[in-house]
Image: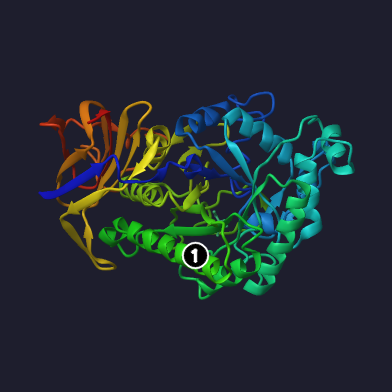
Amino acid sequence: MTTARITIDRDFTIGSVPRRLFGSFVEHMGRCVYTGIYEPGHPAADSRGFRTDVLELVKEMGPTVVRYPGGNFVSGYNWEDGVGPVEDRPVRIDGAWHTIETNAFGLHEFVDWSREAGVEIMEAINLGTRGVDEARALVEYANHPGGTAWSDMRRRNGAEDPFDIKLWCLGNELDGPWQIGHKTAHEYGRLAQETAKAMKFVDPTIELVAVGSSNRGMPTFGTWEHTVLTHAYDEVDYISMHAYYQEHDGDAQSFLAEAVDMDAFIDGVVSTIDAVKAAGKHTKDVNISFDEWNVWYQTGLDTDDQPHQVSKGWRAHPRLIEDTYNVTDAVVVGTFLNSLLRHGDRVHIANQAQLVNVIAPIRSEEGGPAWRQASFWPFARMSALARGQILRLAVSSDQVETKKFGGVDAVDAAATWDEETGRVALFVANRSLEDAADVSLDLRGLSASRIRSAEVLTIPDDGDRFSANVEDDQDRVTLRPLDDAALVDGRLRLNLPALSWSVVELEVATA
Ligand code: AHR
């Protein structure tokens, strides 16, 4: 048995929960848009072709903001191709994913879908093949009320009122040699600065995300952020981070500890931002948009049915990187969400990549059903319950040994306290593959009167750590009541199964 002691104090807070932390991502890639969120002719499609079965799952999962339309796709995309009468839109080659883009779905459709889903839009512009002029035109098209060429085109295309898109990404992964229009940090930094300036001239209320490193292992990581921000610090509001993780060579214990890497990655970017701030004598803060994160099995999968990265042959919406997530992956996703929440003072936006089918918590089949992957649950519960203040926890936990990180806390936790509703939400993973964890939670300055709910995601009774939800067994991995949860002398006592993620909601009063 592993033991851990967690202490929370209502006066030790990190900041308020940034609701944009629970973001997602819809890219024109594989079957995320086509046969994912949009499939005219599907029995559950509405008159606009939006799959209402998928929409219901999206609403249940609760993303607050959705990044669109890419991803690598955006670096070769002409936004004008996706507006106007559908029959007049050009069919194009998408070089990033080697697929055919019909443009049947574009900006207006995404705005309508977002309103239906109740999410904020985070729009990415193309700084791979395009630049300042197209970016400012798009802001004018989307946000200017009317009376100008671009805004009147929007109105002619059926949207009288501006879309009022506040959040914009200045391109995607332009540090990566795989990106269409890959740039050096100097080239990108200057372009981002000038594009940001021109976009804010059109609409000064927008918020802008500069491209950071595509992952922590990039040879330019650190110097890229430093150079880009040295150019564009005054013009931008956020710098992006991207990270994908997977289990390597069956080393599940190291995989389960990858949030240690995520923590260090975030701390490194914060240090770089603040070094540029100090050297440039800037007064405002630039914060982080962790706008792509997830588990992604980038190695090991490459079949005709499930090709890795790009499509084999020019096809519209091929099946790309449709990873099936098991119990282990879901627990890891829970620890990533904990890491993001613990850094909520500087990570103000985060997007799990992606929303449907493509490395996604929701799966759908063409003409068939839609269902929740195992990784759906930590996201859904945290988005629903993380409210109010993020608490700074003191955690004293037994360790698990990992090859990659050495000794790591077996128990990983994050928590929030909402003074208005009088609720504390605790999100806690037991990363040990072998031992249950006996956890006690001490509350200071708060007294707990009742456990409102306690749920756990773990290995099904008749399953193993690879158990997953698939089309003909859609609810194999789900949340179930955490029976071993009790308030004893004002303290919360939990017994967490090995390899599990749990969420406990307490009713509290200030003491
Ligand atoms: O999310 C899949 C891809 O991963 C995105 O298109 C790209 O930005 C990243 O490399």
Toward the viewer: 286 or 42? Answer: 286
Q: Name the residue under label 1.
A: 274
Query: For this view, does 90 lie left or right of residue 50?
Result: right
The 10 Å Cα crowd at callout 1, few under 14, some 14 to 19, many 20 or more, is some
Q: Position of residue 377 (x, y in %)?
A: 37, 37
> x%, y% of residue 389?
38, 39
Question: Above or below — where is 55 with respect to 345?
Answer: above
Where residue 116 appears, x then y in whole percent? 61, 28
Residue at 57%, 30% (x, y): give it: 118
Seen in the image, is 499 located left or right of residue 323?
A: left
Q: At x 55% / y 52%, what residue is drawn? A: 320
Does residue 39 appear to the left or right of 451 in the view shown?
right
- Three-letter amino acid code of the residue under disc 1: Asp
Count of numbered badges drawn on the protein: 1
Ligand 1 picture quarter: bottom right
Residue 446 image offset from top left, x and y in percent? 24, 33
* Colouring used for the render: rainbow
Secondary element at image label 1: helix
**Residue 29 in sight:** yes
| In the displayed structure image, the side of residue 308 where residue 129 appears, left or right | right
Q: Which of 219 and 201 is in front in this view?
A: 201
Q: Is residue 19 above or below residue 369?
A: below
Q: In this view, does 260 lie above or below 57?
A: below
Quadrant containing the C terminus is: top left
Cβ of mark 1 under 8 A from ligand 1: no
Residue 316 versus residue 235: which sits nearer the camera? Answer: 235
Q: Is residue 177 visible?
A: no
